[in-house]
Image (cartoon, helix red, strand yellow):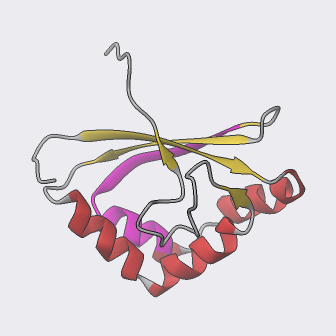
Amino acid sequence: MSNSATRRIAQIVRLKRDSLQAYKECHANVWPAVFDQIKDCNISDYSIYLDEESMTLFATMKYNGIDFEADMEKMRTSQEVRRWWEMTDNMQESFVEGSQGSTDPKGWWKGLEEVFRCE
C-alpha cells in the first residue's frame, strides 16, 4: 500500500502476567537502535498502553511514509529490532491466530479497525 497521508494504526497483544515487571523495565530502557529504526521506518507518535486487569497491551502510532510494506520489511530486517522482538515476544501472547512471532507475515500484534475519531 502506498500513500502520502498519515496513517493511524492501533494494535493489541496480551502480556503474560509473570512478565509484567520485566516488560515495563525493558520499555523504560528501550535500546537506541530500536528507537532509531522506528523513526527511520516513518513511525511517529508511538505509544503502548496497558490494561493490567486484562493484561492487554494497546499500541497506537502514526505512519508518515509513502510505502508502509517496504518500511515494515526494513523494520523486520534490522538485527537489533529482531533481537528486541525475540525478547518481548516471549513476554506476550498474540491474538493473531497461528502467529509465530513478530517476524511472522501474519503479524504478532492484532490490528484494530478505527470506528470513531474526533479531532
Please indicate whether residue 52 sits to the left or right of residue 73 in the image: right
Q: Residue at x 63, y 54 (%)?
A: 94
Look at the picture and state if 11 lies above or below 2: above
Q: Is residue 47 magenta?
A: yes
Please indicate whether residue 81 sits to the left or right of residue 37 in the image: right
Looking at the image, which residue sits at the far top?
118
Looking at the image, which residue sits at the far right?
18
Could you tell me residue 26's position as x and y percent? 71, 65
Instruction: Name the foreground residue: 53 vs 110.
Output: 110
Please indicate whether residue 4 sits to the left or right of residue 43 in the image: left
Q: Residue at x 78, y 34 (%)?
A: 54
Quarter of the figure that contains the C terminus: top left
Q: Is residue 106 magenta?
A: no
Could you tell me residue 8's position as x and y percent? 32, 38
Q: Residue at x 52, y 79 (%)?
A: 82
- In this picture, which residue range is highlighted in magenta? 34-50
Query: In which quadrant of the rendered view does residue 55 lie?
Result: top right
Look at the picture and state if 112 lies above or below 95: above
